Image (spheres, coloured by chain):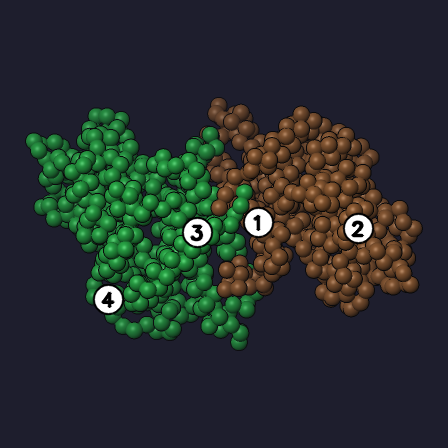
Chain colours: A green, B brown
Amino acid sequence: MDLRFTDDEIAFREEVRTFFRENLPDDIRKKLVDGEHMDKDDLVRWSRILNEKGWAVPHWPVEYGGTGWDPMRQYIYLEESQKFPAPQPLAFGVNMVGPVIYTFGNEEQKKRFLPRIANLDDWWCQGFSEPGAGSDLASLKTRAVRDGDHYIVNGQKTWTTLAQYADWIFCLVRTDPEAKKQEGISFLLIDMKTPGIEVRPIVTIDGGREINEVFLTDVKVPVENLVGQENKGWDYAKFLLGNERTNIARIGVSKQRVARIRELAAKEMSGGRPLIEDERFREKLASIEIDLKALELTQLRVVAADAKRGNTGRPDPASSILKIKGSEIQQATTHLLMEVMGPYALPYRGQSAEGWNEPPDGPDYAAFAAPGYFNNRKVSIYGGSNEIQKNIIAKAVLGL
Amino acid sequence: MDFDLSEEQSILKDSLDRLLADKYGFEDRNRHARTPEGWSADMWRHFAEMGLMALPFAEEDGGIGGGPVETMIVMESLGKALALEPYFATTVLGGGFLRLGGSPQQKAELVPQVAEGAAKLAFAHQERHARFDLAHVETSASRDGDCYVLNGAKSVVLHGDCADKIFVTARLSGGPTDEAGVGVFLVDAKAEGVTRRGYPTQDGLRAAEITLDSVRVNADAVFGPPGEGMSLVRAVVGQAIAALCAEAVGVMSAMHALTLDYMKVRKQFGLPIGSFQALQHKAVDMYVALEQARSITMFATMMADSPDADARARAMHAAKAEIGRAGRLVGENAIQIHGGVGMTMEYAVGHYFKRMTMIDIAFGNGDHHLRALARAGGLFDEKAA
């Protein structure tokens, strides 16, 4: 047992930091530090810079553009990018549909889609959840009926993050309504420009416009856009959700937020002294830090086990811990950050499609604190709610 | 970064676990607890034969040259078995003073005795009004020619009743809570003026109230620089906290395993209670807490012999605080899920719960360490990161 990073790993961390320092545009970094939403253009700009460097899809196999880093280097890279902070690549492409395509797709699909995902030429969104299919995802009803060289797709998807920007959507659709519910599902890639697709925004409680409803009415999808085999889509979805969990602890994001809390709590005054000197406040912060330190070690244990086992494509079920604790810590930090702002967490700053309507009232760092807290309630809901994660652990790890 | 045990470490763990599985079942343990000594001299001999007492000492001093990882392995296994023997008091606490503060002569004299199981040690430090303040020492030491004369009273000295030699803290100068002015003295348990009153603790271990009435010790009984003993005390207590965290992980993992077994066999409403989601989620909460405790214990183990006293102190504050809250969550849920049977003296889970509760209190409870960490600036400030 040796819990130190090797000299090579320490040098690698420095290389990553240097690259971010020299290449991330300041305006993008500032938005991330303040907790402001990024525009599509921000992420496209950054993704192209990364792709130029060869770091757009570090965890992919080298033949499809990956870096060949071992799991520890991938983790170091991820943590540094979150701590810097740099924008996280569009997960729907690089973490979700990309790995599904290179694992289960045909050669044609790999050639057609993978390079465009890495360069963010195609913006992908995820068509899984439906109004009647949330935690019970396999009960989804969106129907795809084979008609010659096409599927005709009808149904409704929801909670579709950033669909307003999307060029493509990957969808779970029901192709065999007679089969057991997990066995009649297929994985389809659908061009968002196809006639019959309508995107309607859903405004979230923070006032943000991240998520949407996507309506599909007689949408014609060429059969070559089926991934893998018909009616095997549930297997691919489970694979995808498993991949999602390995990146979900967001240690670096929480570390960055903890540093931000400490920095701003030294500026905000309470009872004539900096807030950071308030005993109750700093105990709350220390308590979160302890949880975060333990989770960092838990994450590294999972990473080290992955490295030893080799990439099986199946995450350790213990990684559900990462989802549960990681989301709890993100929520605790966003709440504490809001608390730092005191009364200046109150003013609401309206947002139009063009951006912010007016300058903020109070310190400029206060405007996004309460929305950040509100928005982060999502992290214990998405990607399999924390209660679903507990069901997974109870069954797969504890044998109950 | 490597989380695996080396081959030697795996052998150590396996052979100790096998010994405990063979000879230290719950019934054996209860039998030992009921003896006047409160632990088993037979097991102590077995531990010595396995080299457990020699383990943490350097080879040139007559030890085996193990480090914090080896201590973690042993303490976790002893925690799983709810062992009663004075291993922690002797090798971690007393042994810590020997390792970190002993002169070559002091080591040459005492390490071989400890290594073969002949000498048992204890650390007499706690005082009536000190609570969790380590620097609070009112017991006095005054120089008298070549000797020091110690006067005062020490409380809840773990295994102080059976120890052959006792490390005693006493103040040479300054006010009762000053960091400076404290010395560490090795006192023979049979020395004139030492009075001991032994008693069982809530978890079935043993402790003693010790009074020192003009106890004379020679100048060569001082460990570390006289008057600058607190840095030695803090270093030893840091290692002790890491070891206690490892014991706690063993205790928690045993409670969790017992609870899972029970959930699979106990039936109500015609079904195993493990099929009920409300209980499943409690069991998962316990599992998450246990794994987080395991992780922070690895962190504490890694930091246990760090020469950076500030970073080491923060790590120990963090670990002890996390162990405290994890232990309470795991322990209370273990009792709850067992229902009535968890309340009974004859069933093991309650005994684990009691040991866990006492571990939280030892060397400062979770709240104490959380406050201390917060005051020190947290874990991730610029200095600590």
Label 2 with label 3: CB-CB less than 8 Å? no
Judge depth for marks 3 and 1 and give the one in front.
3
> Which residue in the protein does label 2 denote?
B106
Residue A9's disc is 3
> Which residue in the protein does label 4 denote?
A355
| A371 to the left or right of A174 | right
Residue at position x 51%, y 42% from top?
B3
Question: Chain under label 3?
Answer: A
Label 3 with label 1: CB-CB less than 8 Å? no
Question: Chain under label 2?
Answer: B
Q: CA distance from mark 2 to mark 3?
A: 42 Å
Asked which secondary structure carries label 2, the reply is helix
Query: Which percent across, then down, holds residue B14?
Result: 60, 31
Residue A38's disc is none
Q: CA distance from mark 3 to mark 1?
A: 18 Å
> Which residue in the protein does label 1 denote?
B302
Label 1 with label 2: CB-CB less than 8 Å? no
Type of amino acid under label 4: Gly
Asked which secondary structure carries label 3, the reply is helix
Q: In terms of sequence position, does the residue under pointer 4 or pointer 3 come before the other?
A: 3
Q: CA distance from mark 4 to mark 3?
A: 41 Å
